[in-house]
Image (tube, helix red, strand yellow):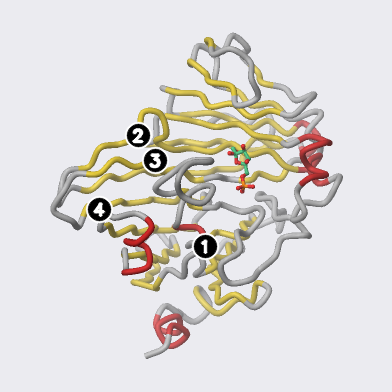
Amino acid sequence: MNREARLDALFIPGRLGPAARGGLPAIELRHASGARAELALQGAHVTAWQGADGADRLFLSRCSRFQAGVPIRGGVPVVFPQFGAGPLPQHGLARTRAWRPVRSAVEADGAVVAVLALESDEALLALWPHPFRLELAVALADTLSLSLAVENTGTKPFAFQAALHTYFRVSDIAGARVIGLAGSAFQDFLGKLPGLERREALAFDAETDRLFTGVPDVVRVEDPGARRVLRIEKRGMPDVVVWNPWIDKARCLEDLGDNEYRTMVCVETGAIRPPIGLAPGSRWLGRTVFRALQEGAPG
Ligand code: TA6
């Protein structure tokens, strides 16, 4: 049975159907509220999330390529088993592979759920010799939640890093703030010495690329220009990376428009430093829930 047939197996009339994202097989999730999301099989990559008001809450570059094996610029790339640069391709192996559909449902509370999986095969084991199974469950309601499970299906322990490399859309990076990182230890990828974050509100006026470890489980992205707050609640994911390429780095990224840095900020949740050790037969679960709030609303 080909993958598209299995893709069909996920469809639920009016709730889960086919979506076209530049030719990559994808599904669209539609919630009764009018909220919608798109999920490409490649990388189990959420490529869009709109609220009932139709507003895009995630950033997707107009220059992103949607070609098999090429990373998508924007949405929620799944990072596994390596974060950033290293012996494996940048951000690991999961985001450029075709995941397979596992199941879908409309839950009692109306949440629309799609689950995709990626199992190690000969090609992946040749790159990273540790049998694994990943599963990503995407649930759309008045929130968007992503649950990533990593299972060690081999006979030896392995260590991995995992993250949801989420690109949020903002009206203007100059006004955006990330709240909730004060007091967290950070390692800066741009050369600043490691330290403790002292700022209650992280603002942006230059390239920013910083890993925060042991971060409280709720952080917020404030977007005053859109009078909106994006609340991020995580479980099992102690670390957060904040990234904006700013002007010069944006110019070097061929799949990012020169000015698109102004309308995006990455606030990535994951388990990065230290890597997670997983014994044979064990399973790790990390979950992140995104909720859009009107400015000033409680929550
Ligand atoms: O967000 C952290 C980071 O590692 C940055 O250093 C930048 O490289 C970004 O990820 C995007 O990486 P990508 O491989 O998707 O271009």
Marks 4 and 3, how far apart in space? 13 Å
First in residue order: circle 3 vs circle 2: 3
Above or below, 214 relative to 59: above
Q: Which mark is residue 54?
A: none
At numbered mark 3, what does the secondary structure look like: helix, strand or loop?
strand
Query: Relative to residue 209, is residue 281 depicted above or below?
Result: below
Q: Label 1: state its secondary structure.
A: helix
Identity of the residue drawn at 69% across and 26% down: 177
**Residue 191, image x, y percentages:** 64, 20
Residue 173 on image: x %, y %? 78, 34
As measured in the structure, the alpha-carbon distance from the residue carrying label 4 to the one carrying label 1 is: 19 Å
Q: CA distance from mark 1 to mark 2?
A: 21 Å
**Rendering coords of residue 223 (x, y %):** 73, 34
* Extreme-right residue of the structure: 259
Asked whether disc 1 touches disc 2, contact meaning CB atoms under 8 Å apart, the reply is: no
Circle number at residue 96: 1
Q: Is mark 2 within 8 Å of ligand 1?
A: no
Q: Which quadrant of the structure image shows residue 6?
A: bottom left
Above or below — where is 90 with respect to 21?
Answer: above
Q: Amino acid at mark 2?
A: Pro
Q: What amino acid is labelled 3 in the image? A: Gln
Name the residue carrying label 2. 275
Q: CA distance from mark 3 to mark 2?
A: 5 Å
